[in-house]
Image (tube, rainbow, N blue to C red):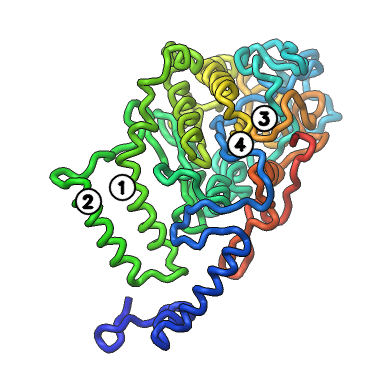
Amino acid sequence: MNDAGGHLPVACSRRDFLYRAGAGFGALALAAIMEQEAAAVGQSNSRNPLAPMLPHFKPHAKSVIFLFMVGGPSHIETFDPKPELDRLHGQPLPGSFGAIKSQFIIGGTPLMGSSWKFRRHGRSGIEVSDLMPHVAECVDDLAIIRSCYSESFVHAPAMYQMVSGRTNPGHPSVGSWVTYGLGSVSENLPAYCVLTQPQGLPEGGAPMWDSGYLPAAYQGTMLRGGTRPILNLAAPQGMSRTQQRRMLDYLKEMNEHTLTPDMTDLSARIATYELAYRMQKHAPEAVDIRNETEATKALYGMDKQQTAEFGTRCMLARRLVERGVRFVQLFSGGGPVTWQWDAHDNVVQNHERMAGATDKPIAGLLKDLKQRGLLDETLVIWGSEFGRTPVSQNGKGRDHNPPGFTIWMAGGGVKGGTVYGATDEIGYRAVTDRVHARDLHATVLHLLGLNHLKLTYLNNGRTERLTDFAGEVITRIVE
């Protein structure tokens, strides 16, 4: 900051000018008005950007766990049965469906039926493939949306669209919008946690949990895998807790001396310092799963090598929301293509590996949340950036398919045992009750008690919102 007269900082905005002019009386008046307005709408007037705030209306859910399957699982191998596609297996695509648009497939590639059988499950009788036998046991808790679509054939842009509503990076993720709208329930843990796969990050990378143009406090906090999800939880060597507290108090006082309401980065840094201090005391217990019963660990598949790693992260997601974390984004897939749901070469080999690692843990998460009474207030989402083509790629694989794919939701006010929308007879295009990412986001916010039209942020003169210029709540899957 530039100095005036050697010691007085120059005002950098009109609001800053009010703080520095007339002995600060203008700022006092502004602060009083803002405090009254905040009280009128039920919002906190705390400088902590993550202070809890009231929703627009009574919510169904308090928190979200988003299970993101990186790479694009095949909807016609999991939750969208297509008997006509199975009947046409090996035959050319009928002309009535038009040309298949994809990234790598050339014209004339034959159709390929599902590699797994579909069977009816639960009281609802919804069909799920044999690839997902454990999740199939929970079908009466699922609202399966079979008519999703997106615009991009490329992984990263499609991922950005699924988490932010836009195909280009730089926009806030849905988790950031949720924490911006509701703040944090927990004072001792991050409001928005991200659990990535040990093999690497998804192709979309950090922009998938970035806060974009929202204040930095609302970005996701990435936790590590393994036995130490959070590093540096010990106090600084040679410093007692009392000394550390005094140091942080002094640092906070110095930072707040120049803090103005438009200095969101500094506000976020102050809040982060305080959160890190509290996490040193409380986070070790939150991520310590040693006291979980052996039966609970087995429910998540932690007793088997194939499912132990993903099961551990699913259990950690439950422990986080149980302790007030608002949004958890958990990835299956990342790093090498062999560790993603990107089945170009061999859909059977790929999906057996990926589903084998995740099916039991996901079912365990749903069952554990339900038996603890947490499923009613926790929205669980399973989805990806797109599906896969009904025609084969090289005879055994499938290419990217954004025109039609499946996502499901459970808990948090979702009407279980339901199916919404449909793709055509071969699973290529969403044709009935089509659902875009903007509609999914509007529904997520609605279940959390937020009106997507009212949750806005002024950025560069434009009023932004998660759903941009569209978005409709999928009311038929809401209880």
Distance, label 3 to label 4, CA atoms, is: 13 Å
CB under 8 Å between callouts 2 and 1? yes
Q: Report crowding for label 2: few under 14, some 14 to 19, many 20 or more residues within 10 A (C-alpha).
A: some
Regarding mark 4 in the picture, which secondary structure is present there?
Answer: loop
- Measured as percent of width and height from the top left, residue 345 is found at 56, 21
- Measured as percent of width and height from the top left, residue 240 is found at 18, 46
Q: Quadrant of residue 441?
A: top right
Distance, label 3 to label 2, CA atoms, is: 46 Å
Residue 260 is left or right of residue 461, and the answer is: left
Distance, label 2 to label 1, CA atoms, is: 8 Å
Quadrant that contains the C terminus = top right
Of badges 4 and 2, nearer the viewer stands 2
Q: Which residue is disc 4 drawn over? A: 385
- Measured as percent of width and height from the top left, residue 19 is found at 42, 79
Distance, label 4 to label 2, CA atoms, is: 44 Å
User: Which mark is first along the chain, 1 or 3?
Assistant: 1
User: Which mark is first along the chain, 2 or 3?
Assistant: 2
Q: Quadrant of residue 229?
A: top left
Residue type for callout 4:
Glu
Rendered residue at 62%/38% (across/down): 61
Rendered residue at 33%/33% (across/down): 284
Q: In which quarter of the image is residue 459?
A: bottom right
Which label belongs to residue 277?
1
